[in-house]
Image: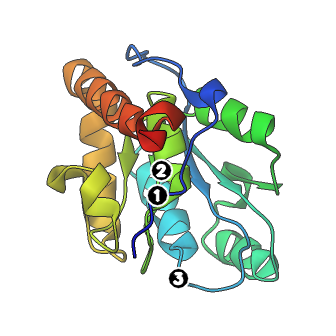
């Protein structure tokens, strides 16, 4: 008995590798639904956004998804003094999610446990560089140098700065992750 991955990305997510753009404000996204446990790393995400801004980087965080813990994470952002730097979008439909990924500069997904997260592969398909944790199937899709312990605020922050400041590195990750995402297209998985 066996089964195949049910990721099967919608073709509309497959865009292209990105070119690095210098911006006044960079957008880092986190996507998870439903938001009902602490396991998806939302607090780590909020702390990373704080650290980046504290270090002088103009970074906006976007948390997509809805659930009973949203008020807790909003309160955490207020306590850390960065509530105005974090946008909570609620649940996004497919086109809205694709737009968020397309308009973001990087995805940070500091999860505690995971299978093979569809949202990371969707982000990769849009050419978005992604940072996450070495749990579940994530090491199958992201290289070791983009994987950290889920609570490693400093490690995530340093890597984000390095990726956003280095045009060549940003484009390298974008290209390689885009190519890797193609392994999860409908045609490949059906075969």
Q: Is mark 3 on a helix, strand or loop?
A: loop
Q: Where is residue 6 in the image (x, y as percent from the top left)?
A: 54, 56
Q: How crowded is mark 1: few (under 14 residues within 10 Å), some or many (20 or more)?
A: few
- Name the N-terminal-most of marks 3 and 1: 1
Disc 2 vs disc 3: which is toward the camera? 2
- Name the N-terminal-most of marks 2 and 3: 3
- Name the N-terminal-most of marks 1 and 2: 1
Residue found at the very far left of the displayed protein:
144
Q: Residues within 10 Å of mark 2 (few under 14, many from 20)?
A: many
Q: Can residue 97 be seen in this view?
A: yes
Q: Marks 2 and 3, Cα distance to the nearest angstrom?
A: 16 Å
Please name the residue that numbered disc 3 is placed on: 39
Disc 1 vs disc 2: which is toward the camera? 1
Q: Position of residue 52 (x, y in %)?
A: 42, 51
Q: Marks 1 and 2, Cα distance to the nearest angstrom?
A: 14 Å
Numbered badge on residue 120: 2
**Residue in the picture at 53% in, 25% down:** 14
Residue found at the very far front of the displayed protein:
1
Quadrant in the rendering for residue 113: bottom left
Q: Marks 3 and 1, Cα distance to the nearest angstrom?
A: 22 Å
Q: Where is residue 27 in the image (x, y as percent from the top left)?
A: 56, 38
55 or 40, nearer to the observer: 40
Please name the residue that numbered disc 1 is placed on: 5
Q: Where is residue 116 in the image (x, y as percent from the top left)?
A: 43, 63
Q: Is residue 57 visible?
A: no
Q: What element carries label 1?
A: loop
Quadrant in the rendering for residue 101: top right
Q: How crowded is mark 3: few (under 14 residues within 10 Å), some or many (20 or more)?
A: some
């Amino acid at each position: 008995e066996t089964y195949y991955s049910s990721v099967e990305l919608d073709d509309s997510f497959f865009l292209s590798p990105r070119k690095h753009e210098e911006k006044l404000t960079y957008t880092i996204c986190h996507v998870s639904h439903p938001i009902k446990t602490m396991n998806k790393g939302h607090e780590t995400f909020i702390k990373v956004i704080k650290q980046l801004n504290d270090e002088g980087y103009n970074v906006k965080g976007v948390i997509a998804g809805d659930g009973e813990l949203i008020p807790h994470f909003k309160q955490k952002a207020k306590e850390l003094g960065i509530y105005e730097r974090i946008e909570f979008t609620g649940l996004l439909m497919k086109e809205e999610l694709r737009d968020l990924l397309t308009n973001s500069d990087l995805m940070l997904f500091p999860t505690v446990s995971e299978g093979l997260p569809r949202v990371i592969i969707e982000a990769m398909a849009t050419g978005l560089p992604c940072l996450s944790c070495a749990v579940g199937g994530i090491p199958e899709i992201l290289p070791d140098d983009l994987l950290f312990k889920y609570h490693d605020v400093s490690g995530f922050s340093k890597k984000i700065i390095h990726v956003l400041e280095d045009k060549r590195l940003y484009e390298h990750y974008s290209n390689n992750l885009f190519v890797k995402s193609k392994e999860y297209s409908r045609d490949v998985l059906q075969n």
